C-alpha cells in the first residue's frame, strides 16, 4: 500500500471509531471492529482502488464487523437485539454509510476527550490516545515507552474498561458547562504535550529521542487545531511543538551524543518548521490573553529567530518566563527562568534564584536542577564544583545520552579527577 493511502487510513481511523462509538456506545468492541475494517481496506484498496467515499466505506465495513462480532457472542443476545433494532438493514449494506447530509461529522475531538477521561491516569490516557486516535499498535506504543507489550496491552485494556464503566457518551461534556469543557480540553493538550516530550527527550533507554512519538503528537495536535482553529492554546501548543522539533537535526552529534542548545549548528534546524511555528504563534498571540502553551511557544520563537546563540534576546525571554511563572507556576518553569536570569544578570544571580528551588521536593532529585547548577558554576569559573554538580546530574538522569553528555562535561572541566 502506498504512503498516501496509509496516511488516509490514519487520518480516517479516529473519525470512523468516533462514528461507531457515537452510534453504538461500546468503545472496546468498536475499536476492534475499526481495526478489522482498516485491515480490510489495506488489503482491498490497492487492488480495487480507493472508494469514492472512503470514510463511509470504513464505517460500513466496521459496522458489519461489529454486528457480526455481537451475533457470534450468544451471551450478548440482548445487546445484539438493541443494536439490530437501532441499525437499519440498508445502513449495513450501503457503501456510503455516512454520506447523507448532516451525518458526515467528525467525532475526532470527542474521541480525544473520551480517551483523556478524568478517571484515567496520565499513562493510561497517553496509551489509549495513541491506540484509539493515533492508530499505533500496542507493540509500537510499548516499544516507544520501553515496556513489555503485555504490560502495555494490560494498561490499554484497563483504560478501555474504565471508560466503559464510566458510561460516558461520545460528546462534548455539557453537564459542567464551559468550565468542564475547558478542563477536558486542558487534559487533551497535556496528554499531547507529554507524548511530544517523551518523543523529543526520552525518559530512558539508549536513544535520546523517539521521532515517531513526536511526529504523532504533532499530527494529532494538527488535527486538534483543524477542529478548533480559534483556540489560542491549541495553536500555541502546535507552534511550540513545531519550533522545538525544528531543532531535532542539530540535537545529536555523529555518535548520537547530545548537543545542547547553545552549541547547536542552527543551520541544521528545519527552517520550514521554524517558519510555520513563528507564523502560527505570531498570528495567535495578538488575539487575546496568552496561555502557558502560547508563552512557551513565544519563548521558543525568540530562540528560533536568533541566528546564533549570542544574538538571543535574553531580556525578552526573561520577561516571557516571568509571565509564564505568574499564570502557570511550577518549579520547572522557575528552573528555566533561572537560566534566563543568569544570562541577563549574571550566573551569581541565577545561583541565588536556584537556591530557592533546592528545598522543593519535586526537583530535589531531578537531574536538570543539578545540571543547571553545574552550568552556572562553570560560567563562574568554579570548575571543580561544577564537575561535581555535573556528576550529580549524571547519576540522576535515566537517559543514557544525557548521562554521557553530563559525564563528559565533568571530565572536560576536571580531567585529572576522572
Image (cartoon, grey):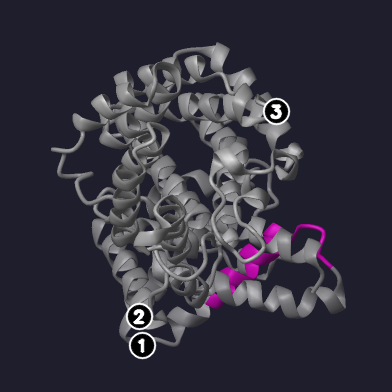
Q: Earlier in the sequence, mark 1 or mark 3?
A: 1
Helix, strand or loop status at disc 2: helix
Find residue 59 and report its horizontal and vertical position in percent.
62, 63
Judge left or right: residue 201 versus residue 41.
left
Helix, strand or loop status at disc 1: helix
Q: For mark 3, what is the residue?
A: 307
Q: Nearer the viewer, mark 1 or mark 3?
A: 3
Image quarter hosting the N terminus: bottom right
**Dominant SS type (magenta):** helix
Please, is residue 345 above or below residue 373 in the view?
A: above
Judge left or right: residue 213 versus residue 334.
right
For marks 1 and 3, give the CA distance: 68 Å
Q: For mark 2, what is the residue?
A: 77
Give 92 or 369, whichever is nearer the viewer: 369
For marks 2 and 3, give the CA distance: 67 Å
Find residue 105 and report its horizontal and vertical position in percent.
60, 45
Please, is residue 334 above or below residue 114 in the view?
A: above
Tell me which corner region of the image, top left, top right, bottom left or bottom right, holds residue 400.
Answer: bottom left
Judge left or right: residue 68 versus residue 3.
left
Residue in view at x 65 percent, y 32 percent: 277
Helix, strand or loop status at disc 3: loop
Please, is residue 190 above or below residue 41 in the view?
A: above
Q: Nearer the viewer, mark 2 or mark 3?
A: 3
Residue in view at x 58 percent, y 20 percent: 284
In magenta stretch: residue 400: no
Q: Which residues are magenta?
A: 50-65
Q: Earlier in the sequence, mark 2 or mark 3?
A: 2
Q: For mark 1, what is the residue?
A: 74
Residue in view at x 39 percent, y 43 percent: 190
Tell me which corner region of the image, top left, top right, bottom left or bottom right, holds residue 407.
Answer: bottom left
Determine contact: label 1, label 2, CB under 8 Å.
yes
Amino acid at each position: 500500500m502506498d504512503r498516501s493511502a496509509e496516511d488516509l487510513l490514519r487520518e480516517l481511523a479516529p473519525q470512523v471509531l468516533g462514528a461507531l462509538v457515537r452510534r453504538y456506545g461500546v468503545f472496546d468492541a468498536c475499536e476492534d471492529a475499526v481495526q478489522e475494517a482498516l485491515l480490510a481496506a489495506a488489503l482491498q484498496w490497492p487492488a480495487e482502488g480507493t472508494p469514492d467515499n472512503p470514510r463511509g466505506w470504513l464505517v460500513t465495513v466496521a459496522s458489519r464487523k461489529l454486528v457480526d462480532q455481537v451475533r457470534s457472542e450468544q451471551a450478548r443476545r440482548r445487546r445484539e437485539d438493541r443494536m439490530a433494532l437501532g441499525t437499519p438493514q440498508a445502513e449495513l449494506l450501503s457503501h456510503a454509510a455516512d454520506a447523507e447530509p448532516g451525518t458526515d461529522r467528525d467525532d475526532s475531538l470527542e474521541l480525544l476527550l473520551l480517551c483523556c477521561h478524568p478517571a484515567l491516569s496520565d499513562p493510561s490516557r497517553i496509551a489509549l490516545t495513541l491506540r484509539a486516535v493515533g492508530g499505533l499498535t500496542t507493540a509500537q506504543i510499548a516499544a516507544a515507552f520501553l515496556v513489555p507489550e503485555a504490560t502495555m496491552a494490560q494498561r490499554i485494556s484497563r483504560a478501555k474498561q474504565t471508560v466503559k464503566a464510566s458510561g460516558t457518551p461520545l460528546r462534548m461534556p455539557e453537564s459542567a458547562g464551559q468550565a468542564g469543557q475547558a478542563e477536558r480540553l486542558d487534559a487533551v493538550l497535556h496528554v499531547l504535550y507529554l507524548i511530544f516530550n517523551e518523543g523529543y527527550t526520552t525518559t530512558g533507554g539508549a536513544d535520546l529521542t523517539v521521532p515517531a512519538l513526536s511526529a504523532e503528537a504533532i499530527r494529532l495536535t494538527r488535527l486538534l487545531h483543524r477542529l478548533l482553529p480559534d483556540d489560542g492554546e491549541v495553536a500555541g501548543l502546535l507552534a511550540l511543538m513545531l519550533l522545538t522539533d525544528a531543532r531535532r537535526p542539530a540535537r545529536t552529534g555523529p555518535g548520537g551524543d547530545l548537543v545542547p542548545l547553545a552549541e547547536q549548528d542552527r543551520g541544521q534546524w528545519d527552517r520550514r518548521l521554524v517558519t510555520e511555528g513563528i507564523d502560527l504563534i505570531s498570528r495567535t498571540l495578538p488575539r487575546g490573553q496568552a496561555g502557558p502553551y502560547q508563552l512557551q511557544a513565544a519563548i521558543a520563537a525568540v530562540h528560533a529567530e536568533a541566528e546564533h546563540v549570542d544574538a538571543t534576546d535574553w531580556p525578552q525571554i526573561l520577561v516571557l518566563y516571568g509571565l509564564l511563572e505568574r499564570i502557570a507556576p511550577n518549579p520547572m518553569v522557575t528552573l528555566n527562568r533561572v537560566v534566563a536570569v543568569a544570562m541577563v544578570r549574571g550566573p551569581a544571580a541565577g545561583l541565588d534564584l536556584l537556591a530557592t528551588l533546592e528545598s522543593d521536593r519535586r526537583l530535589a532529585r531531578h537531574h536538570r536542577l543539578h545540571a543547571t547548577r553545574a552550568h552556572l558554576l562553570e560560567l563562574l569559573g568554579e570548575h571543580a564544583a561544577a564537575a561535581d554538580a555535573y556528576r550529580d546530574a549524571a547519576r540522576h538522569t535515566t537517559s543514557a545520552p544525557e548521562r554521557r553528555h553530563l559525564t563528559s562535561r565533568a571530565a572536560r572541566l576536571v580531567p585529572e579527577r576522572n
